[in-house]
Every structure is written in C-alpha cells, then in structure tokens.
Image: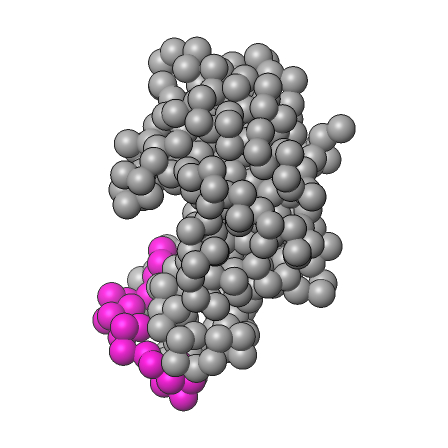
Amino acid sequence: MSIYPKNSVIMAPLAGYTDLPYRRLLRRHGCYYAFTEMIDTGSLIYSKKVTRNFMDRGDEEEWLGIQIVGAKIDEISKAIDIINQREFSVLDLNLGCPTPKVVRKGKGGGLGRNPDLAAEIIELMVKKSRFPVTAKMRIQDEKDPESTIYLAKKLEESGVEAITIHGRLLKAIYSGPCYADIIAAVRESVNVQVVANGGVVGRESYLELRKNSGCSEIMIARGAMGNPWIFEEILENRKPITTEELSDEMERHVLETVDYYGETLAMKLSRKYILDYLGGRGYTGKLKCNVSRISTVDEFKYFMEEVRKGPTARYKTWAKKFFEEF
C-alpha cells in the first residue's frame, strides 16, 4: 500500500519554515500532505522547549509527517520514544540535508553517503516507530544511477515504505539542474513508492518533473517559500495573485506567527518570510532593506501600508502582460 495517493503534491520538511503557522498558511492554499521542520535528534532529546514545539500539530491537520536528522543509533532510539508519544502520519529520516555543519557530523547528506549505517538506522526506526517509516535522500551521481539505486535498495530492504529523491547532488545544494532521469531509474528499480523532488517553482516545472521522473507524486520545497499559492497553481491551475491577495496573506501569516511565538521572537523569524513574499514581485530594494528594521507589530503594520501600494510602476507595466490586476 502506498503512503501517498496517486498525484499527491507534498510539502517538504523545511528547517526554519514548516512550523505550525507556516503549515496553516500552506493548507489555506491546498496543501494536504505536509511535514514538520527537520528535527535534530540530539536537540530533541537534550535541548530546549523550542525544539519540542516543532512537533506541535494543529487540530485541523489531518495529515502530518515528522522528519528527523541524526546519525547516532542511541540518540535516534531515544528520539523515537519521544515521537511515539505524539501522533503523526509518517516518520521520515533525512539523508539529504546539504548544510555543512550537518554533513560534517555524518547526518543528513553525510548519512546518505553511508548506506550501511543508513540501513541500520532505518531498521531501528521500523522496529520502534508507531508510524510508517519513510526516507528523503539525494541522487548520488548525476550520470550513473547505480549508486543512487544501491542506496535506495538498502533503504527498501530495511523497511521504508516510501523514498523521496531530490534530483541534485549534495554539493549542488539547491541550484543547478534536477536530474530526473536518475530518479526515474530508481523508481524502476525498487518496489516502494518513489516521490520526486527538486526544482519545482510552479505548474510548468511541476509537470516537467513528473514527466521526466515518471513519478506521479511530487514534493515541493523552496518553491513554496513566499508562494503558498503554488499548491493552487499546480492543483487548480489558478491565476497569478493580486497585490491585495499578497498583502492580506503576508499580514495574516506574520500575525499568526506572533500569536504562536510572541512578538519579539515572531518578528525576528518573520523577516525572512517577508523578504520571500516580496522577492521577484517588483518591490524596491529600499523597501526590502527596511525589513531588517522591523521588530514590533506596529512597525510591521506601518511597513504593510507601503506593501499594499504595490510594486513599482515599471514592474506594473511589464507585468500587465501576465496579470489582469494588481
């Protein structure tokens, strides 16, 4: 039985992003399958309350996966004991995070380079977890699929029920082409469900990844940053957003983040969200620079008055070819 129904569009676990307020934002625009932020197993066991908050689940969230990153058997075992006290739809192991401080510790993408240890960890997770176990990995070679197939088969033999594959090498981080042909080769070589991931920023790139990978299930990641409407674009072929829609959703998102974290922390966290919303939408560099100075709700509301005026006149003239309204 597959973890995801055919044609599912899934939101990836994004560190620093997919907390409860962010997921509520995405769900308003058609996202059903979503994950917590990536959670470090050591931090989950030993660290502060903030890490435990990553596991918060809204009452309205019918489907929620949790993703962990780690490479120590004892830590992962203890983390699963904590996770088993909550309710999740799947437990996912990260084998692809490219962050240097993660990779240096043998976690994330570093663990993806160690198939034997990765398989041992998956076996433990399958044995202890109350929830189905999945994994997210990267391709291991952009020309020869055999090393990627080998890792995927090791995970399959260890009991994973689905594998998400990011079609870029670890060293590529998030740039460059997505090698969907390598994902396709893996899909044809294993019997578990394979989800394709990498480079989806809209409906066109979504359809291209589906076609080239042969996967009907696609995971969205950075393409949803500042663009929660991507799910409606993909699933419903919706029209581009207006300035009013952008402004209303940005303001609602930030204020819900304030309700969740409190003003001081929320405004600090929200600066990156605000810049994501403004990016590529014709707003001036001067306005974007002012984001770093926002530290209170009152300052944010004043800032939003400028956002609601819309992008520059030059951008509006260009964009009228594609937008009916601002």
Against 2, is 9 above or below?
below
Image point (58%, 36%), residue name: 125
- Which residue lies most toward the right here? 1
Q: Main secondary structure of the magenta part?
A: helix
Image point (58%, 29%), residue name: 123
Q: Is residue 230 left or right of residue 8?
A: left
Is residue 199 covered in magenta? Answer: no
Quadrant (top left/top right/bottom left/bottom right) for the N terminus? top right
Image point (47%, 61%), residue name: 51
Q: How many marks?
A: 0
Q: Position of residue 256 (x, y in %)?
A: 54, 74
Give the color scheme: rainbow, by chain, secondary structure or one colour.
one colour
- Which residue lies most toward the bottom here? 298
The residue lying toward the viewer, choosing from 197 and 14, is 14
Q: Position of residue 56 (x, y in %)?
A: 59, 63
Q: Position of residue 140 (x, y in %)?
A: 38, 22
Whether residue 278 is visible, yes or no, is no
Image point (69%, 58%), residue name: 61
The residue lying toward the viewer, choosing from 46 and 98, is 46
Q: Is residue 225 left or right of residue 133?
A: left
- Which residue lies most toward the front here? 74
Against 263, is 127 above or below?
above
Is residue 281 covered in magenta? Answer: yes
For residue 92, what is the image quadrant? top right
Q: Which residues are magenta?
A: 279-302
Whether residue 77 is visible, yes or no, is yes
